[in-house]
Image: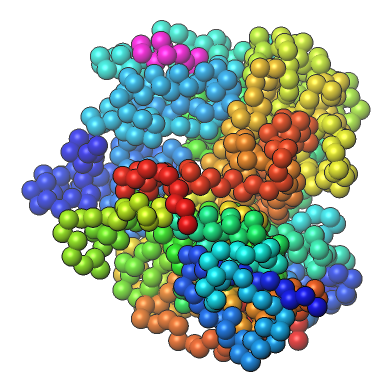
Amino acid sequence: MNKKIIATTSLAGCFGCHMSILDIDERILDLIELVEFDKSPIDDIKKFSRPVDIGIIEGGCCNSENVEILRYFRENCNILVSLGECAIMGGLPAMRNGIPIEECLREAYIDGVTVGENTEKIIPNDKELPILLDKVYPCHEVVKIDYYLPGCPPRADLIWNALYALITGNEMDLPYEVIKFD
Amino acid sequence: MNLQKNSYFCCENNNNANVDEFFKPYLRFMKDLTKKIAARYNNDPTRLMDILLDLHEVQNHVSDDQVDTLAKILNQSGASIRETISFYHFFSMKPLARYNIYLNNSITSVMRDRQSVKEAFEMDCDIEFGQVSEDGQFGLFNTSCIGMNDQDPAAIINGKIFTNLTPYRVHELIKGLKSGQALDDLIYENHGDGNNSDPDVHSMVYNHIRKKSIILKKDYPFYEVLKTKLKDVSPEDVIHKVEASNLRGRGGAGFPTGLKWRFGRKIEGEHKVIICNADEGEPGTFKDRVMLTEYPEMVFEGMVISAYATGADIGLLYLRHEYKYLLKFLNRKLDEMRAIGVLGKKVAGISDFNFDIRIQLGAGAYVCGEESALIESLEGKRGEPRDKPPFPVEKGYLGYPTIVNNVETLATVVKILYHGADWYTGFGTKDSLGTKLLSISGDCKFPGIYEVEWGTSIKEVIEMCGAEEVQAIQVGGPSGMLIGVKDFNNLNSNELMKWYKPSGMMIAEKFFDRRLSYSDLPTGGSIIIFNKHRDLLKDVVMNFMDFFIEESCGSCSTCRNMPFVMKNKLQKILDGHGVRKDIDDLLSWGKTLKASRCGLGQTAGNPILSSIFNFRHLYEQYIQSLTDFDTGFDLEKSIQASAKFTHRKASLHSF
Amino acid sequence: MNQQVKIRIDGQEIITERGKTIVEAARENGVFIPTLCNMPGVKPKGACRICTIKINHRMMTSCTTPVADGMDIENNTDELNDIRKSIIELLFVSGNHFCPACEKSGNCELQALAYRFKMMVPRYPYDFPRKEVDSSSPKIIKEQNRCIACQRCMKTIVDEDGRHFFAYEDRGKDLRVVLDPILGKEITDELAKKAMENCPVGSIIYKELGFHEPIGTRKYDKEPIGSKIES
């Protein structure tokens, strides 16, 4: 059997979902029998080198770079999976949603109680930096997403079961205990 | 804008001790006023509406301090009082202006250039809508349909109606007010017809009665049934006659009136209540306005007859706040009735028949037109519909058996008793007897009230009111719906149609042969005509959706949230981001609304659903042909605000 | 008068007593009808609409409708379950329900219903409205981001004089349940705890207490909501 090609990325996420992928423990040995990783922080491949079967997205879109990477994934992946609360509904970064971006930036860099010394009252604006979006978008509100695996992080068993089914083409068998939003 | 400095009554939350000292007499005054007004209603929490209305009459808002005072007197929490205040459009917790201008935003108003009227107000008052001017002189507010569709754009200014507004008229009006002219003087320059010139009405509203038939014809002396007939018939006979006439409720739902009365008669109660529902709020309906201006005697007479038939002793007429200008006049009519013995004790000379009527003014909430919400409002609460069962006839106002009838229904009863049921059944069609008052507005030469026999076709309606180049007709107001083209693509129409139980509908040309009747096109009487130049989706449907979003009581999770979600989806389509699935989504999402408690919620999706049914091609023209996926996300747009704030070019990063 | 009535739910015959609501009768007979605003012993007000059932093709709320002899009720049908799921999804998108950061997570009835109805992602776009958090009371926090306006606190948290601590404010989309600022300051420990317990979601939080139950041992970690009724 040809190995399936997998790619992963973390957008506005905390890498917790990636950690949870690693939490499948010894089954990771089974996994590498079944798949090869392409673009992913796990192997540090930066660009897609071939068409990908399954793209796994952690995190929502909080800036322009997130959107572009997400679109890049959509173009190169046959199946896209939103992994974890942030990808599915914005997650904690989306707590800023509903608050105007000006207010957020001012609070973060100038007025907030945790702001250190910023005597010049600078809000970072180097042209190399991605530009923040007006709110944090769930991935499916930007591109088409095929599967959703909720959790913060998603349980390792959920990831394994779902991934195994996608790779082998079997029905997903997801028990009640593994689908959780926290 | 600093209201604190300029407004006479604004004094709470002020930290400045000197100012506190300065305001103390006002604070005391306000507290005493609150106590005095509450005492007027025996400190009865079920009269909270009246207490609040009276407070607004004096000072146009209720302050936090006054809420606390009221809470103490009525033994409730402040939150419970604010619950009622915040529900009603014409109540306010913030000081309003000396002149509060509520400009109607109904579709007929929009069609007659509301925009430039709005701009004229904003320019002359130097504020935007939703604001109060710094000097406290003017406040500008939007408001839902005020029942003046035949003379829109119209506005309510301090309870008085100003119709047929144009920028020119607005300039004159504001100039007059600024120069110190009294509001009343600005009305006198132009009285409406009929009783609108009655000293107690003093309004520039026109009745526009265009067609009279058996109800509107003044072919009998008022109160004649009460004076000469009632004592010779038993309550049973009255009910029997109404049943024989096959009269059905004229509010729109069409429940048999005789049956309702029979239930009411049968159910025992310490008291029984007759309510006349004059909270006509369905956009495009204004027949009750005209009935109450020209035929209040008949409406009240109908209430007395209904009380006699059912054994009721309490009568309430719930008058929508927008028609407050009729209140004094209507109360005078009640006094006249008491003076001649057809109201009060021993009514019409019948020894054990005591019945009196009180008029309860509403405070601006469409949903109060729903009978159980209306009863809640009468009890001083938010106008939230009740769960049924129990029905009002079992357990209504203050728990008493309550019969709620429409203005038109009650007036019709009088004619039926006067002329006989046989006479009445000679009009109309087999399944829909008698006549119906239509409120016709929109794109036609002669908007107004038309009394037509049931069975009249839409084609006749169009000719009657002088409408040309008609594109669509909304029958039954926004909660009505649009039916028609059955061959819509891949959809199973039967499957879909069973979801929609319209109280009326919007129809396309193809169906202009259809007839007004309970079996074909039932209606509460609102007919709005749109000609070929109107944008049905952008203007009409969006306006109707805004109406439902504004007027939802919010109690049901469905109606609180779904109309907004659906409107956003329609906006997405109109913005050019629509894909085929969006239309299917709208149809499917609308089903959830059917789980709502009351008619408002159940029909809140109808503007969209019915326009998809009958004008699907209007949607199709927005649907993108090259893609079947578009969330409406726009990267360029979404980075604009932050790029601007950080002084960056909104150019995209390339990774 | 005969107190016994016979009803059918999805074909299953149930014998119950006059005066009970459909939801009560179902609950006592091992039939689960999902509810959210309903609380045993409290006067129902069909606010959430999740318990919608069908009688004679008419949708009714089972928490407010009393049983009547011969009622034939549709409950566990695709059509009704889809409407229920759609309502749950609506509640998720119209508030800000950040489950990972919520004290009630695992014990939250809204979340539990979402699990039971297998909501992976709501079908509606997220609204992300701006809501306030009211922490003015010394005992409780009213977290408006999570409130679903079910009225449970409004109906059950009342002082000796019958005054309500919680009430609605505004209407329509702006509707919210607010805590009375004066009563909120004096709320007893007992009532504050009761308020938190009665809240089906995490909108009323007792101060200085949170995340006290480890993941895995919470109410809905292992068993779907309604399992107790069905077992």
- Is residue B386 visible in the rendered structure shown here? no
The single residue placed furthest to the bottom in the displayed view is: A26
Classify residue B35 as left or right of residue B567. left
Classify residue B558 as left or right of residue B127. right
Asked if the stretch drawn in magenta spans residue C145, the answer is no
**Residue at 76% across, 30% down:** B617
Vertical placement of residue C44 versus B192, above or below: below
* Quarter of the figure with residue B632: top right
The single residue placed furthest to the left in the displayed view is: B18
**Residue at 78% across, 25% down:** B508
Vertical placement of residue B476 versus B69, above or below: above
Residue B261 image offset from top left, x and y in percent: 75, 42
Q: Colour scheme in the image?
A: rainbow
**Residue at 60% across, 64% down:** A48
The single residue placed furthest to the right in the displayed view is: B430
Vertical placement of residue B258 versus B121, above or below: below
Q: Quadrant of the N terminus of chain B?
A: top left
Residue A120 image offset from top left, x and y in percent: 17, 55
Asked if the stretch drawn in magenta spans residue B169, the answer is yes
**Residue at 71% across, 34% down:** B619
Classify residue C214 as left or right of residue B535. left
Residue B520 image offset from top left, x and y in percent: 85, 31
Classify residue B538 as left or right of residue C105. right
For the residue pair B252 and B42, the one nearer the viewer reads as B252
For the residue pair A102 and B486, the one nearer the viewer reads as A102
Please state the total of marks drawn on the protein image: 0
Which region shows up in magenta? B162-172
- Is residue A93 visible in the rendered structure shown here? yes
Residue B183 image offset from top left, x and y in percent: 35, 18
